[in-house]
Amino acid sequence: MMTQNLLVELLVEELPPKSLKQLGQSFAQLLAASLEAQELMNQNAVVTAFATPRRLAVHIGNVAAQAADKAITQKLMPVKVGLDAQGQATPPLLKKLASLGADASVVPQLKRELDGKTETLFWDSIATGTSLTDGLQKALQETITQLPISKVMTYQLADGWQSVNFVRPVHALVALHGADIVSVNILGLQAGRETQGHRFAAKINPIVLHNADSYAQQLSTEGAVIASFAERRAEITRQLTSAAAREQLTLINDDALLDEVTALVEHPNVLVGTFDAAFLQVPQECLILTMKANQKYFPLLDAQGKLANKFLLVSNIRPIDPAQVIAGNERVVRSRLADAKFFFDQDRKKTLASRVPELDEVIYHNKLGVQGQRMHYVRAIAKMIGQQLNGEILANQAYTAAMLAKTDLLTGMVGEFPELQGIMGRYYAQYDGLGNDIAFAIEDHYKPRFAGDDLPRNEVGICLALADKLEILVGMFGIGEIPTGDKDPFALRRHALGVVRILIEKKLPLELNTLIMQTASIFNDQMIENQWSKSYFDWKKKSEMKALAVGVRGLNIKEESTGRLLEFIYERLAGSLREQGYTAEEVDAVLSLNPQNLSDIPKRLAAVRSFAVLPEAVSLAAANKRVGNILKKTEGDTSAEVNSSLLQEPAEQKLYDVLIDLSIEIDGALFARDYITYLQILAVLKLPVDTFFDHVMVNVDNESLRNNRLALLRELHDTMNRIADLSKLAT
């Protein structure tokens, strides 16, 4: 059947820039999938998406005008229901045939076949292929309803009576199959061949499209529009890179900003702007965020990685003299940077320490009290961790950092730009003369904030980051705020992975279970009286806050909650390890022992992987599983120790002797945490273990012999499973 290329376009008012890329991709994919399901296009057809601020479009290759006819077999009804005693069609059968577009004339053609045990009537017919008009109409309706639109607009159609819903009002619909218009309609619009180019730079408006294949070229030459999102993005990148090179500066890479700017322009033109160098006294993170978030500008860095007083802007117009465009943007950025400088200057008039009492004004959670209350716990946890890691000096530094960690939330700069929390705390701490150990810890205690993020850079930051995350996890699990499905409003999954990464990658000699129990103990045992200040509260507010604080002091973290939290953390750890390339069997073998020192886990995994390639591994893993099953069935019957005088069979005596001979060597490897050597030593057990099971009956009638052999198996099982549960490797 003859095919031609298809073009479909929705011409709309300006679409949300942060969702344009996804909308464009989804529009193309959903429309193509529907047409493919209706057999109007081949699954290998080339699908090209277009998306600009004012349009969603798709070009699909080799679309048929009508799908091919196909033979179908339809089950009708049991023979005894469809035919009477004389073999004539009954009313139910005639009604069924009529619903399928047939009549009594097809009754002789019906087939009788068994459907299970029932003889049933079947009808073989030819289904006419769907026409492109009908198929595209259905595809458009399905696509419009399935687009990932978070919030729709309701607007009136031109007749003034009807209303429709879409992300933005749609003004035109184009549907071309080759050069022919496909007669479809959607959102109150009939398909045509006219579209619009750039609002100001188009040579022709409206643009009359010749055919489906001329779309991108006509929009470019006649409409001054780069229709492809990817091509427009590449052109902006090229211009940005070129402009930065001319200025001998470096562009800050930001894919999200680049996508957003690509979604704001149809005819990109990169220009260079400047601002007063005096603003560079403000922390560059503030200036960069101001330019990116508020103005969608691209900041530039000098050779030393410092912010330059120049920036790149992407204009949607190309005037002969761009000076006015540049000057207008410079005026706007000047006022924005002045705001940032004002916040910075005002914030430095108060020290971080003077802001600590204000944390008692900030409600953290209705069941966990105010932020000031919470930070009392974090201080105690941070001090505890510091004491365990490096003694009193680190403990006191961690305590000080914890006391100040959240005070920058009360500053004007962070109030304006929440993304700067921690960063501004570091700057203000340095301005207060607190030193880099404390300052960097305040910035780093939020880390890691996402997958692949850096970890805290010093010991104080490590203590504080762990304390902050442990307090959140233990507190939230203690009040039953546990993530379910996709809902995790307090980012507990991220905090759990943060704890895991810090313990493992920083190789900390801290046990996870102990940390959680100590944190829970601080919640349960520490009675904290808030320091109330009349300068911050009126009597009513003070009473409300005290009521919250009293509720928190009564919080009791139960063992059940900490158990669920441990399980939750191990689940996150297991998922993370699998993403790193470890097999499910390797991860299960190590984590099934619930190792408390997480810094050991990479070594254990490496040892398991090394063991698994040994020739003896398969046999030993299977034997280990067999031993485990035997011991499970006889729990409580095992003797505490092996009595060598009761070892009657040569095979059990040999196994016992090998275990005794290995004990010194494997204990040394275990002490040195040389887990690879430990598991490789176990290879010598293959022969005595196999011989034992070939020649020794464990469950004999003699109770003393039976219990002694079970004790021997217990010792074997313990020896084999100190690093990992090797039975998990058994196939």
Image (cartoon, grey):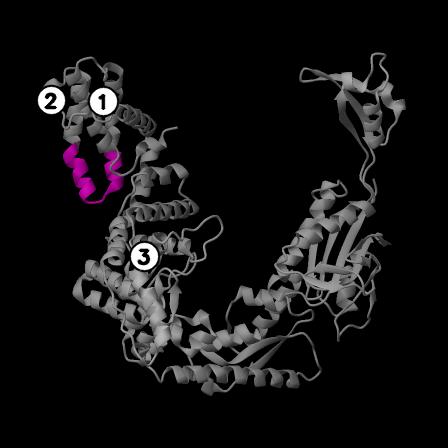
Q: Residue furthest left?
A: 645
For badge 2, the amino acid type reads: Ser
Residue 470 numbered mark, or none = 3
Discs 3/2, front: 3
Residue on which the image places disc 1: 688
Q: Which is nearer the eye, 112 or 2?
A: 112
Q: Which residues are magenta?
A: 663-681
> Where does the image place residue 300, in percent across and percent down from the top left?
50, 76
Determine which quarter of the picture holds residue 673. Answer: top left
Q: Total number of numbered labels?
A: 3
Q: Is residue 210 left or right of residue 576?
A: right
Q: Earlier in the sequence, mark 3 or mark 2?
A: 3
For badge 1, the amino acid type reads: Pro
Residue on which the image places disc 2: 644
For marks 3 and 2, give the CA distance.
49 Å
Residue 233 numbered mark, or none = none
Residue 407 visible within the image? no
The residue tagged with tag 1: helix, strand or loop?
A: helix
Q: Which quadrant of the rendered structure holds the C terminus?
A: top left
Determine which quarter of the picture holds residue 660. Answer: top left
Residue 565 lies in magenta, yes or no?
Answer: no
